[in-house]
């Protein structure tokens, strides 16, 4: 085998084709991996635009083996390893080509297409530079060919849509040279090691050996080995006295994190965690032969380790004020703030600030993070902001003032009081951040009431409760009907209010509260120990007026708890973040789907009227034609811009796979709700299945609540559902239940061990709303259904049942069908469940 480091452009140039063998898995990169790659590309682009020397970024290796060569044909290479990154880059180029087309850059479109994506003078399969596995081929060629169905609901389509969205967002923030610089970065600044096998090598054995290696050395392991190689005389003593205690107190992961933070707070803020060893080695190289200097370096790292322990274990901090804010940041979670926090502790221990000043500075950090979450400010560049902070803070003023001035910078987007108040009233807070962060904000708001006997949150098992239920009974809609605006339905008003902060509280009584009428909820909340619940229970009714009034009261408390930036006024002329979010959502929609003005309004915390006005004035927005009326019709106000040669919206949607009836209404199964749009944007909108993971135990009280709700709301479906669940148990599964507003049911399989459970479930059954969700979103992360083909097979088997019509575009979501159908076709459902268990068991046996 031979190896060489090469750029992506040089790798793919020429009449050649990279074929992914059938024994390899389908394309599986998700948002996390795509985001990491795009951040790397973004750094290269920024460096290039700033005129800084940009060293090629090492992306990894690609192992190739020569394939059959036919006279006059392309040179074929089998992709033994590296198909994920190779496919990802090809999809990034298809998105870039289509982005250049939107910009009107015909030469750029032609250049990318011919240089990267296709063998121009070959036809059929030979036309494509990359040929994925059979399961991915149709989705991939749709993207390369720019077909209407490009960007479907599978992983290939999701990656293409991710890059379309990233390019659109970056172009709006960049200058005229930005897209061209992205092309340069992708072609010439991503470094790949090409490893080529010789003819006759057993490529499958090579593949096995690459993918069955042991655990490699971590970055901190490599650094340790390098440092102590340079300490031949003092190494053993320094290891015992300094390195080993630090390693034991932090553990492997935190030690590696510390070594990276050490670089960041020194000003090397562009260093990636994958490059720790190389950067530290470069920094320490000049000290070779000077054991005194090397010992001082390790002593400084050990001191920084003790400060880092105060961040991850605030009980170690002696100052009460500083300990309190460190505890709040630990409760908030995440590592974003670590570089700035560690830098402030460095200043404190060096005597350059006081504990109270450091506490106030970190209070601004908390406020910055909380306000951005409530206002749903995009998290783009958030990590970079905190990594830059240690180097950028002004040193001629107190730390708290310096931090406030730094975070108040215009491009750092610290929301003003005005923006915060508006967001509390309108934004779907329940889809903001992660569940612990939402609970944290509600907890801090509750504590602001300063009750004489405060709740012990460490012991209380509280969860977020919707006062106006997510799935309300008819009585709630009767109440909302009294407050609707002209041309607004009670359902639309419900959707705009239900997830806002004014409608949310904390409670340990979710199961009791369920979706009861407000009078019943009042009785339960009145006995709560939480002051905010007593305030709710004192209301005479619970509708739009009360929710907005409570939102304003909570906003007053939020402004006091979390102070705003210097100036505190929303910048004039700045575009609303809601429109940025709208554009991102429309780009994220799979082909063959549609949504409504109301769904988009619910997502961004607006109203259908301004959404319609915005899209009417900006029909060039990618996917604008996919937004329809609530009946599924093209809006009469929608017009393409003058001079556009695009086909009518209904014709375009039909070419993507959207079905229309004779009255021109799009099929409801292909509609994306606001929650599904939020899911596609990476929001944490799913309620976790609160279940008992032990197969031998089912919660009897929860089971009875589920059966009672099913009998009450869908009596005709009761027998069929119970029969299917009994069948599931006979197949080795068990049944668990949710603890939310309605007692959902999950037929569960546990294919793991007592130490490492491997839980999966095919559906969730909701007895009040009368729906059965097929949980592709969860299955996507669980073998063997992380393979798109297995999820597609599940979809196809269910769609053979009369009354089930799940669109393929929702293979990464949670489409639903009526529980009535589940019950009426119980025998056919059981056949699908039997297949599901068999596939999961076979995968378990294969994995050993």
Image: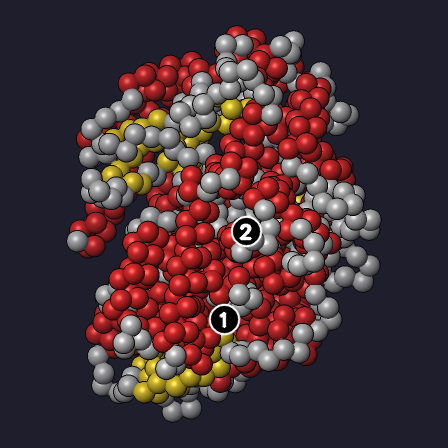
Q: x, y (%) of residue 659? A: 57, 45
Quadrant holding the N terminus: bottom left
- Side of 252 where 815 appears, left or right: right
Q: What element carries label 2?
A: helix
Residue 281 versus residue 837 in the image, above or below: below
Q: Horizontal and vertical percent for residue 115?
A: 55, 81
Q: Name the residue under label 1.
A: 90
Q: Viewed as shown, does residue 547 lie left or right of 797?
A: right
Residue 111, disc: none
Above or below for 701 versus 109: above
Disc 2 marks which residue?
Answer: 348
Note whether residue 441 is visible: yes
Q: Which residue is drawn at 27% across and 66% down?
A: 237
- For marks 1 and 2, the one nearer the N-term is 1
| Label 1–label 2 contact, CB within 8 A | no
Front-lying residue, 594 or 8 = 8
> How far apart are the alpha carbons under marks 1 and 2?
49 Å
Residue 516, horizontal then vertical, whole percent? 51, 14
Residue at far bottom of view: 71
Q: Is mark 1 on a helix, strand or loop?
A: helix
Taking the spot 29% from the left edge, 72% from the top edge, the residue there is: 234
Q: In which quarter of the image is residue 359?
A: top right
Residue count near mark 2 (Cα–Cα under 10 Å), binned few <14, some 14–19, many ≥20: some
Task: Name the residue nearer the viewer: 190 or 743.
Answer: 190
Residue 397: quadrant of the picture: bottom right
| Res 105 quadrant in image | bottom right
- The residue at 50%/10% (across/down) is 527
């Amino acid at each position: 085998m031979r190896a060489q480091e090469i750029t992506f452009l040089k790798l793919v140039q020429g009449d050649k084709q990279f074929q992914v063998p059938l024994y390899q898995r389908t394309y599986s990169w998700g948002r996390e991996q795509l985001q990491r790659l795009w951040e790397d590309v973004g750094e290269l682009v920024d460096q290039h635009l700033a005129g800084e020397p940009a060293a090629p970024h090492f992306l990894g290796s690609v192992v190739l083996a020569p394939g059959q060569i036919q006279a006059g044909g392309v040179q074929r290479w089998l992709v033994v390893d590296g198909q994920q990154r190779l496919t990802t880059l090809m999809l990034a180029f298809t998105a870039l080509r289509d982005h250049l087309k939107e910009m009107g850059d015909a030469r750029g479109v032609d250049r990318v297409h011919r240089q990267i994506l296709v063998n121009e003078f070959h036809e059929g399969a030979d036309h494509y530079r990359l040929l994925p596995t059979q399961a991915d081929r149709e989705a991939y060629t749709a993207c390369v060919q720019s077909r209407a169905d490009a960007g479907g609901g599978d992983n290939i389509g999701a990656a293409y849509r991710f890059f379309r969205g990233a390019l659109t967002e970056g172009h709006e923030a960049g200058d005229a040279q930005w897209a061209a610089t992205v092309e340069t970065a992708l072609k010439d600044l991503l470094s790949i090691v090409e490893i080529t096998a010789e003819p006759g090598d057993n490529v499958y054995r090579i593949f096995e050996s690459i993918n069955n290696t042991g655990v490699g050395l971590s970055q901190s392991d490599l650094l340790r080995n390098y440092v102590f190689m340079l300490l031949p005389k003092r190494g053993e003593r320094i290891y015992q006295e300094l390195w080993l205690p630090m390693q034991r107190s932090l553990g492997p992961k935190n030690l590696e994190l510390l070594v990276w933070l050490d670089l960041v707070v020194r000003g090397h803020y562009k260093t990636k965690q994958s490059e720790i060893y190389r950067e530290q080695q470069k920094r320490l190289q000049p000290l070779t032969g000077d054991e005194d200097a090397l010992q001082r370096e390790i002593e400084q790292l050990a001191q920084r380790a003790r400060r880092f322990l105060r961040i991850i274990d605030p009980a170690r901090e002696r100052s009460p004020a500083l300990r309190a804010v460190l505890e709040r940041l630990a409760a908030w979670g995440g590592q974003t703030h670590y570089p700035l926090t560690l830098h402030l502790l460095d200043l404190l221990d060096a005597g350059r600030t006081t504990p109270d000043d450091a506490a106030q500075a970190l209070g601004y950090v908390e406020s910055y993070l909380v306000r951005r979450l409530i206002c749903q400010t995009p998290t783009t560049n958030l990590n970079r902001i905190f990594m830059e902070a240690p180097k950028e803070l002004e040193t001629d003023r107190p730390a708290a003032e310096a931090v406030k001035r730094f975070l108040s910078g215009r491009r750092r987007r610290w929301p003003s009081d005005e923006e915060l108040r508006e967001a509390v009233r309108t934004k779907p807070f329940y889809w903001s951040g992660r569940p612990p962060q939402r609970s944290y904000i509600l907890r801090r708001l509750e504590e602001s009431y300063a009750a004489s006997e405060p709740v012990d949150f460490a012991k209380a098992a509280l969860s977020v409760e919707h006062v106006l239920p997510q799935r309300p009974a008819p009585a709630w809609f009767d109440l909302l009907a009294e407050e609707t605006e002209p041309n607004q339905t009670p359902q639309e008003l419900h959707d705009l209010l239900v997830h806002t902060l004014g409608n949310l509280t904390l409670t340990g009584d979710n199961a009791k509260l369920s979706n009861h009428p407000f009078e019943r909820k009042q009785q339960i909340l009145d006995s709560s120990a939480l002051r905010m619940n007593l305030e709710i229970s004192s209301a005479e009714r619970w509708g739009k007026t009360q929710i907005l009034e409570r939102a304003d009261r909570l906003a007053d408390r939020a402004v006091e708890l979390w102070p705003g930036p210097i100036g505190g006024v929303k910048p004039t002329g700045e575009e609303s973040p809601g429109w940025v979010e709208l554009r991102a959502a429309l780009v994220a929609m799979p082909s063959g789907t549609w949504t409504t003005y109301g769904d988009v309004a619910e997502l961004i915390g607006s109203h259908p009227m301004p959404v319609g006005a915005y899209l009417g004035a900006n029909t060039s927005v990618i996917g604008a034609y996919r937004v329809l009326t609530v009946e599924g019709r093209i809006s009469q106000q929608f017009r393409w811009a003058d001079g556009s040669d695009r086909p009518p919206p209904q014709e375009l949607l039909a070419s993507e796979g959207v079905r229309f009836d004779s009255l021109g209404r799009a099929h409801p199964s292909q509609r994306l709700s606001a929650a599904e749009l939020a899911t596609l944007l990476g929001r944490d909108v799913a309620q976790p299945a609160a279940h008992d993971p032990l197969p031998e135990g089912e919660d009897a009280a929860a089971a009875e609540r589920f059966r009672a709700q099913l009998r009450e709301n869908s009596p005709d479906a009761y027998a069929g559902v119970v029969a299917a669940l009994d069948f599931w148990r006979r197949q080795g599964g068990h049944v668990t239940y949710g603890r939310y507003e309605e007692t959902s049911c999950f037929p569960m399989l546990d294919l793991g061990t007592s130490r490492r459970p491997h839980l999966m479930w095919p559906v969730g059954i909701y007895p009040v709303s009368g729906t059965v969700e097929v949980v592709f979103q969860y299955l996507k992360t669980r073998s063997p259904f992380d393979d798109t083909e297995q999820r597609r097979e599940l979809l196809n088997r269910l769609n053979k049942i009369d009354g089930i019509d799940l669109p393929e575009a929702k293979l990464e979501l949670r489409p639903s069908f009526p529980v009535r159908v589940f019950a009426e076709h119980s025998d056919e459902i059981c056949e699908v469940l039997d297949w599901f268990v068999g596939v999961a068991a076979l995968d378990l046996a294969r994995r050993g």
